[in-house]
Amino acid sequence: MELTRFEDAGKLVLAIAGKCTVEHAAALREGLLAAVATDPRLVLDISGVEEADITFLQLVLSTAHTVARSGGTLTRHGPVSQAAISAARVSGFTQTPQLTTFFSDEGRDG
């Protein structure tokens, strides 16, 4: 798994690529927490996710809750990778109220 931070239109974007599975959960959690601490208007780019499991989705949902409590927003930059959307559909995360927009084109910010 690879995490890359960059700025787009004044917002922090965290690009997540590679395998986003339980083996990488601790590193992903740390990266997400650091990004939220920097800017609660977090934008995730998950177009490079090659493999995703429930742990990845739970961390995305937890991040959505965290930014909301901070008065921020969680949006998406770019398309959703096939691996991420497949995992979200199978597990029902596309129907989770906090993530419905994130996984649709309405949640896209760039």
Image (spheres, rainbow, N blue to C red):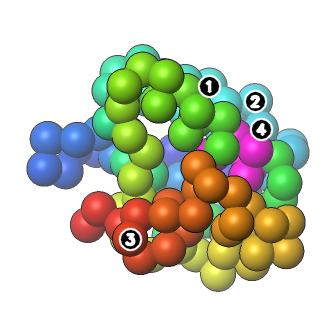
Residue nearest the viewer, comparing 51 with 109: 109
In the rendered image, which quarter is residue 74 located in? top left
Three-letter residue code for mark 1 = Glu
- Residues at discs 3 and 1 in contact (Cβ within 8 Å): no
Report the residue that reaches farthest toward the front: 97
State the CA–CA distance, disc 4 to disc 1: 9 Å
* SS under mark 1: helix
Is 3 on the left-hand or right-hand side of 59?
A: left
- Name the N-terminal-most of marks 3 and 4: 4
Residue 81: give x, y in percent of width and height: 58, 75
State the CA–CA distance, disc 3 to disc 2: 29 Å
Q: Which mark is residue 30?
A: 1
Classified by dominant secondary structure, the portion drawn in magenta counts as: helix
- Residues at discs 2 and 4 in contact (Cβ within 8 Å): yes
Residue located beneath label 3 in the image: 106
Q: What residue span does the magenta drawing correspond to?
A: 56-60
Is 10 on the left-hand or right-hand side of 49?
A: left
Residue located beneath label 4 in the image: 25
Is 20 in the magenta?
no
